[in-house]
Amino acid sequence: MGTLWFNGTFISMGQEHETFEAIYERDGKIIDCGSKHELLEKWKNEILHKKNANGTFVFPGFVDSHLHLIGHGQKLLRLDLSKCNKQEALDQLKILSARDVEWIEALGWNEHNDPNHDTLTIDDLNAISQTRPVFVMRICRHAAYVNQTALQMAGIDESTADPAGGRIERDEDGNLTGVLHDAAVTLVQNCMPPLSRQSVKRALETAIQDCYRHGLTGGHTEDLHYYNGLVETMEIYEETINDRQPFRAHLLIHHEELDAYDYSHYKNKREISPFIELGALKIFADGALGGRTAALSSPYSDDPETTGLLIHTEDKLKNLVESARGRQLGVAIHVIGDQALDMALTAIEEAPVVSMRDRLIHVQIARKDLFKRIKQLPLIVDIQPRFVVSDFPWVIERLGQDRLPYSFAWKTLLLNGIPCAGGSDAPIEPVEPLLGIHAAIARKEPGKDGPVYGESEKLTPFEAVSLFTTGSAFAIGKEHERGQIKPGFDADFTILDQNLLIADEKTILNAEVVATIVNGKTVYHNERFEEIGDERIES
């Protein structure tokens, strides 16, 4: 016995203008699509429930193709500085320091929010506390700002060498600045007290509930390294996501967890439960543009002394890709700079994919020759449209004009026939898919008349929504069961009060998530969405 959904516009996303008047779903699967009259007549002996979409627009469930789900929950629960200027950030840290906390921690610092782009210094953080460690993660999560106490706890002084894949920042006189990049951040993190299982679970639950509210029915997430290891984190996922709290969680395996994976009962498993899957091997090839650790093939325009930071040597990266192949795994490689992209492509070319699809995450800075190489491989590019909003205009100074034609070039990727999926990289960017869709279409600050960054790279509404539906499904080999409204597909829906495919930019920004449905279950709804029950429907 199943459910008839009616009185809405059901947008298939299989073809651009294909819609249905009603659908019939049973046991979490779409069984049939058509008109209300047709479905009511055809399935009248099996319809147990009838749900009224109240004139709304029903899309396939939006799925974020790249986020850090537990990290997003932590951002919602911890001190978040992502909207603060420098003085506001220091004020918030001071308030936190008055509490009985062992570590004074905050997330999301972004110096570009300050009118003068003033950043946090070691003197600033020493003034917050000289007895307790202060740790502030930059919004990109590839850099952290710490006080002298934190450095001392980690055993870092002027003579400490940079770790492989990291950098301990020093001023021109060789003094520590309190800024750590990439692998250097872990030197301090290793001194922090371990997170309790309860706190990690709370962060995951908080993140899922927030995703529901924004219309997300699933996400591809990278969490299996930072919260007491792969096995404990997987157990927390299994405890949290179930029929009562369904969410399509596709989990990447951090490369440092390969041994744990090999010795666990998760090895060689893909479908852990109806809602939890293990995916590709996640590898970081470089850092981020904000801290100038994205690896470029030529120096940064605003700092000619550096070309960024490669996390691995070329041989090590090749070995990691080969390790994935030996386990029948695809790879998901973080590449922001063109040098890192070049190296990642070489590693993949020398060790072709065997089963699971490979993906390149971010691909913010590229070159024409690299686009040609991507096109020749069975690769998915995992893009984050909101990066256009957050990185411009300062990224123009960082890269210079000559590199911009193949930077943040989402339309060029699609025109070259390269499959793309869309994500937020939350908690680094807002998790709301509507903001990502707007950024892909408008390529400017939402709600403002400011400049458009890369007019020729704007996506159409259909292309933008596809990133979060068919694109996310294709990235993980689920294109035959997710990402569309059609028979045989999962009954996951994002229900909106606007049709994004014909809406203008302003309307998209003001669009409202009316309900979120996972596996046929309503996990979020507002007052506009009502379940009618078994009343008679006039044909």
Image (cartoon, grey):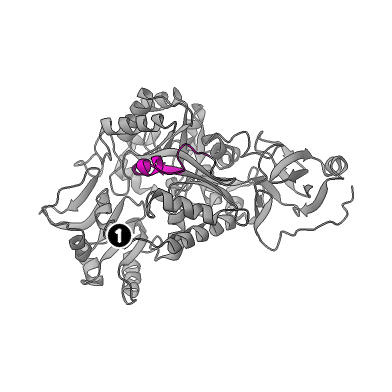
In the rendered structure, which segment of residues is drawn in magenta? 252-270
Which residue is identified by label 1? 116
Magenta highlight on residue 158: no
Query: Which residue corresponds to the image point at 46% horizontal and 35% vertical from the top-left?
Result: 381
Quarter where residue 21 is shown: top right
In-front residue for pair 233/361? 233
> Up-down: is 173 above or below 473?
below
- x, y percent for residue 271: 54, 41
Q: Say if the magenta span includes residue 255.
A: yes
Report the residue at 26% width, 41% height from top. Answer: 308
Label 1 element class: loop
- Which residue type does callout 1 highlight? Asn
Front-most of 330 and 308?
A: 330
Crowding around mark 1 (Cα neighbors within 10 Å: few <14, some 14 to 19, many 20+) is: few
Q: Position of residue 358 (x, y in %)?
A: 45, 32
The residue nearer to you, when weighing 493 against 43, is: 43
Q: Can the viewer see residue 335 in this picture? A: no
